[in-house]
């Protein structure tokens, strides 16, 4: 009874493959297993590249937006120059 393993479980273990590209475990160098999905080393590399490109794109937009983030001391200096009659 203790060693009775479900045939479905055995089938699942034998047929591990990447959930992204479908590559079989025997064809992949590394297959990382999640709770309900697996990913091969090549898909991980591709995903890392996509994340890097996305981050670079976001940083590019941030740098080109012209938004000037002031330091707290610069904000207080600006407000110190201000008076309510000339509305800065
Ligand atoms: Zn893959």
Image: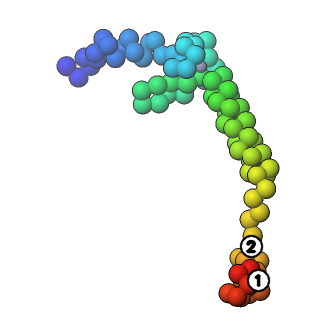
Residue 5 percent across, percent down from the top left: 28, 17
Asked if residue 2 can be seen in this view, the reply is yes
- For ligand 1, the image quadrant comes to top right
**Which quadrant of the view contains residue 42?**
top right
Residue 3 percent across, percent down from the top left: 26, 19
- Give the mark count: 2
Residue at the spot x=46%, y=12% of the render? 15
Image vertical order of residue 76 relative to residue 61, above or below:
below
Give the structural element (helix, strand or loop) at label 2.
Answer: loop
Q: Are marks 2 and 1 in contact (CB under 8 Å)?
A: no
Residue at the spot x=74%, y=84% of the render? 86
Query: Circle 2 is placed at which residue position?
Result: 71
Residue sitting nearer the eye, 67 or 59: 67
Numbered tag placed on residue 44 in the rendering:
none
**Which quadrant of the view contains residue 54?**
top right
Cα gap from disc 2 to disc 1, whole angstroms = 10 Å
Query: Circle 1 is placed at which residue position?
Result: 77
Q: Is residue 7 left or right of residue 82?
A: left
In the image, farthest residue toward the left: 1
């Amino acid at each position: 009874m203790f060693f009775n393993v479900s045939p479905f479980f055995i089938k699942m273990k034998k047929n591990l493959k990447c959930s992204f590209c479908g590559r079989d475990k025997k064809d992949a160098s590394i297959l990382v297993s999640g709770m309900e999905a697996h990913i091969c080393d090549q898909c991980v590399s591709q995903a890392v590249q996509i994340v890097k490109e996305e981050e670079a794109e976001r940083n590019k937009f941030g740098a080109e937006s012209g938004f000037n983030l002031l330091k707290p001391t610069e904000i207080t200096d600006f407000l110190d120059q201000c008076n309510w009659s000339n509305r800065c």
